[in-house]
Image (cartoon, helix red, strand yellow):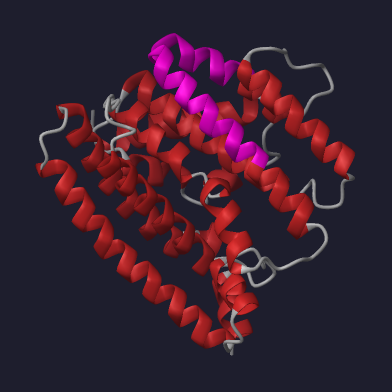
Amino acid sequence: MGTDARHTDLYVSAATFLTQYGLHPDPAGYLAHGYVDLCLAGWPTASGAELDLATRWALWTWIVDDAFDGELLDESPQVVGEFTLTLLLVAGGSARPGAGDHPAVHALADLAADTRAVMPALWWQRYLTHLEEWVHAASAKLLDFVQPHRTPTLRQYLTIRPTDGGMLLAAMWCELAGRCVTPDWNDALVQSLLHSFSTIGCLANDLAADSTDTFTAVDALRASHPLPPTQAHEHVRALLDAEERRFWWLCTAVRDDELATATRHFARALDRFRHALTTWTTTSTRYALAAPQALQALG
C-alpha cells in the first residue's frame, strides 16, 4: 500500500474513532496537530488491526491527558477522583461505562476489548498495570500540583513524571503496532533502554511545554536550585542531548546482545518511534504555538 493510501486509511480510522465516541468537538482540527503523521513515521512498517489499535491508544491517551490538563482543572477532588476510579474499573473489566460517563470511558471499554482479542494475555496484563499507574500519576499531578498551583521540587517531579509521561505505554504501542512483543521486558538492559526512552520523551515534551505549565523539568530544577530560567532551560536541553546519546548506546547493546529476535526488533521500533516523537514534538502545532510563549518567558 502506498504512503498516501496508508495515510488516508489511518486518518479516516482516527477521525472515525474521535467522532464515534465524541472524544473531541473538532476531529479534523485535533488531527491537524499531526497525530496520524507521527504514528506512521513511528511505525513505518506497521499495518492492519495492530497499527489501527496502536494509533487509537495513542489518541485516547492524548485525549485523556488533555482532560486532566484542561476540563478537569476546575473540578473538585471528588469529581477528579470519580473520573479516575471509573477509568480504572472500566480498564480492568470490573465495570461497564454508564450513560453519563465521559466519552473517554466509553472508548476505553471498547479499546480494551479489541486489544484483548488480538494481544497475548500476559502483554495485556502488563499494559493494564502501566495504564493504571499512568492514570493514578495524572490524577496525582492534577490534584497535588496543578490545581493548587504548586511547582514540584526535583524529587517530586522525578517521582511522578516518568509515569505521568506515559512513555512506557508508548513503548507497548510499539510492540503492538510492530508485532514485536518482547519476552525480555524485565531484562536489566531492556529496562535501562526503556528508562532512557521514557526520559527522552518527557524531557522533549517539557522543553516544548507552554509557559503556564509548571510541572516540567525546567521548573522542578529551578525549584530545587536557584537558577535563572534560561540557564535551567539550557541545562535540561543538555540533559536531553546526553540522554539521546545514552539511548543510542543502550539500543546498540540490546540489538547486539543475544536476546530474543523480537527484543531486537522491539529496540529498533523504540528507536524509530523516539526519533519520530522528538521530531514531531518540535514541529507539531500542539507544541509550536506554546514554544514562542515559553521562550519569551525565559527571557
Residue 148 colored in magenta in the image:
no
Give the vertical position of 235 relative to 195 (above or below).
Answer: below
The extreme top residue here reads 117
Rendered residue at 45%/9% (across/down): 117
Quadrant location of residue 215? bottom right
Direction from residue 201 to residue 211 in the image, left or right: right
Viewer-proximal residue among 32 and 254? 254
Could you tell me residue 28's position as x and y percent? Answer: 57, 42
Rendered residue at 87%/46% (across/down): 75
Rendered residue at 81%/36% (across/down): 81
Residue 126 colored in magenta in the image:
yes
Query: Dominant secondary structure of the magenta stretch?
Result: helix
Give the vertical position of 184 relative to 270 (above or below).
Answer: above
Direction from residue 182 to residue 60 in the image, left or right: right
Rendered residue at 63%/23% (across/down): 107
Could you tell me residue 65's position as x and y percent? Answer: 63, 45
- Of the 4 image quadrants, the one containing the N terminus is top left
The answer to whether any part of residue 293 appears in the image is no
The answer to whether any part of residue 192 appears in the image is yes
Could you tell me residue 96's position as x and y percent? Answer: 72, 12
- Magenta stretch in the rendered image: 109-136
- Of the 4 image quadrants, the one containing the C terminus is bottom right
Could you tell me residue 60's position as x and y percent? Answer: 58, 34
